[in-house]
Image (cartoon, grey):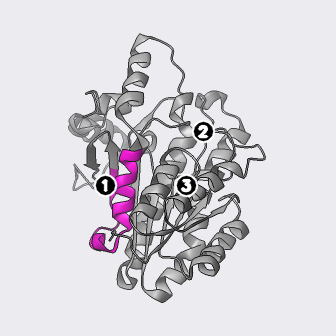
Amino acid sequence: MGILDGKVVLVTGGGNGIGREVALLAAAQGAKVLVNDLGGSVAGGDEGSTGPAETVAGEIRAAGGEAASNTESVTSMASVKGMVEQAKDTFGGLHAIINPAGILRDGMFHKMSDADWDAVLEVHLRGSYNVTRASIELFRDQQEGAYVLFTSTSGLIGNIGQANYAAAKLGIMGLSRIIAMEGAMKNVRSNIIAPFAWTRMIATIPVKDEASAQRVDRMRNAMRADQVAQLAVALVSPLAKETSGQVFAVRGNEVVLFNQPRPIRSVARMEGWTPESILDQALPSMKADYTDLGATASVFPYDPI
């Protein structure tokens, strides 16, 4: 018996990295799995390949599970609607979507091209919209459905050279929150994960100095895709019915719950504010509570557990 017995799960980006581990684990936990993967490169923009998705689906079937493959892109609403219909036609329904599909087009913001900005937003933010919008009415009608979307500490905290990625990933946080709020009465849940894991995407991080080399080695050796998969699969289980609208991270063997933006300090002036009084009084009084400009490594400076 598994925690996903009788459920049908769509996993995007399921041919490699986190998606592959999610698909295999979901199947091991009893789910029928539709493995989607365009089969493209980390940067996207190429024609892709049918190989990765079908390879993973074949592994699941060889292990005694039920799986089918799909090689369409999450950037196309028509293609995503086709995935939903394929799951229904092949397995009789759809109960959860786990959406780690993504690309990277890193670069300093003052050098970023429109094409690199658009490509990353299209896959991550538009892709997350597509998979949720294409299935939300089904989930609401059957009063059952769960999403796990993927954010990043690049958006939650910040990393230099990833403005496009950060913007998309923080947008996904807002999207997931609203889906969770609007779906609460219909048993439709949505949560997001910021993964720390060695994947093809992380392998593209440039190693410029000894410090970055050591950081990459830590990620390669101690933060694996299969560790992220454990939480993703748990979150779409009916046993997690009280968990929705939350922001998690997985870092090695740590599961981290992030807070979400709430007021931390306010100042008031009965006679109202002027630019001068804001500069003289308001900003100095709040300065101690400013969030610094440190990147993800400054928030997680310790080795993964």
Q: Nearer the viewer, mark 3 or mark 1?
A: 3
Image position of 139 with respect to 287: above or below: below
The answer to which image quadrant residue 5 occupies is bottom left
Asked whether 187 falls inside the magenta stretch, the response is: no
Which amino acid, by three-letter code, is at mark 3?
Glu
* Secondary structure of residue under mark 1: loop
Mark 3 vs 1, N-terminal side: 3
Q: On the rendered image, what quadrant is the N terminus found in?
A: bottom left
Q: Amino acid at mark 2?
A: Leu
In the image: residue 144, left or right of residue 250: right
Asked if the residue at tag 1 contacts the one at tag 3, i.e. Cβ–Cβ closer than 8 Å, the answer is no
Q: Are marks 2 and 3 in contact (CB under 8 Å)?
A: no
| Residue 98 percent coordinates (x, y) | 48, 61
Question: In which quadrant of the rendered view does residue 245 lie?
Answer: bottom left
Residues drawn in magenta: 226-248
Magenta span has 240? yes
The extreme top residue here reads 210
- Disc 2 or 1, which lies upstream in sequence? 2
Left or right position of 31 against 34: left
Which residue was labeled with disc 1? 260
| Residue, disc 2 | 104
225, above or below 177, in the image: above
